[in-house]
């Protein structure tokens, strides 16, 4: 029973070393990766939030429209 347990522990240790060494090698920065030296600051020009808005078109006001929201005698007297 003891030799079988020793072989299982040794096999698990070898598998652990193989798995951890492959993960470390993948995370290491090599010559194939390009590092950016100039990091842009988050401003209004290059912000992702303002990139979704249309360019050159004014944003309509958020007030209710007087054309389709006006009912005659809608106020209680």
Image: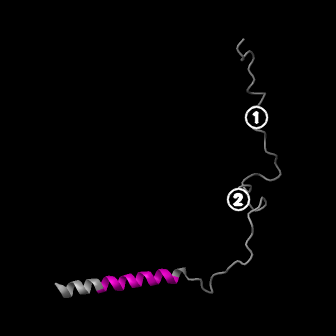
Read off the magenta span. Answer: 10-25
Earlier in the chain: of badge 2 and badge 1, it is: 2
Identity of the residue drawn at 30% across and 86% down: 10
Identity of the residue drawn at 78% across and 39% down: 61
Residue 70, by quadrant, is top right
Magenta span dominant secondary structure: helix
Residue 13: within the magenta? yes
Q: Work out how far the residue at label 2 is from the one at label 1, CA to CA, in angstroms.
A: 26 Å
The dot on residue 48 is 2
Q: Looking at the picture, does residue 37 appear above or below residue 60?
A: below
Disc 2, SS? loop
Query: Label 1, on which residue?
Result: 63
Identity of the residue drawn at 78% across and 28% down: 66
- Marks 2 & 1, CB-CB < 8 Å contact: no
In this rendering, position of residue 6 left or right of residue 76 = left
Disc 1, SS? loop
């Amino acid at each position: 029973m003891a030799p079988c347990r020793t072989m299982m522990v040794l096999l698990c240790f070898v598998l652990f070393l193989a798995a951890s060494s492959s993960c470390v090698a993948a995370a290491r920065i090599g010559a194939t990766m390009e590092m950016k030296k100039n990091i842009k600051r988050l401003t209004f020009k290059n912000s992702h939030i303002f990139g979704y808005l249309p360019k050159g078109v004014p944003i309509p006001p958020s007030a209710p429209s007087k054309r389709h929201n006006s009912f005659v005698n809608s106020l209680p007297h």
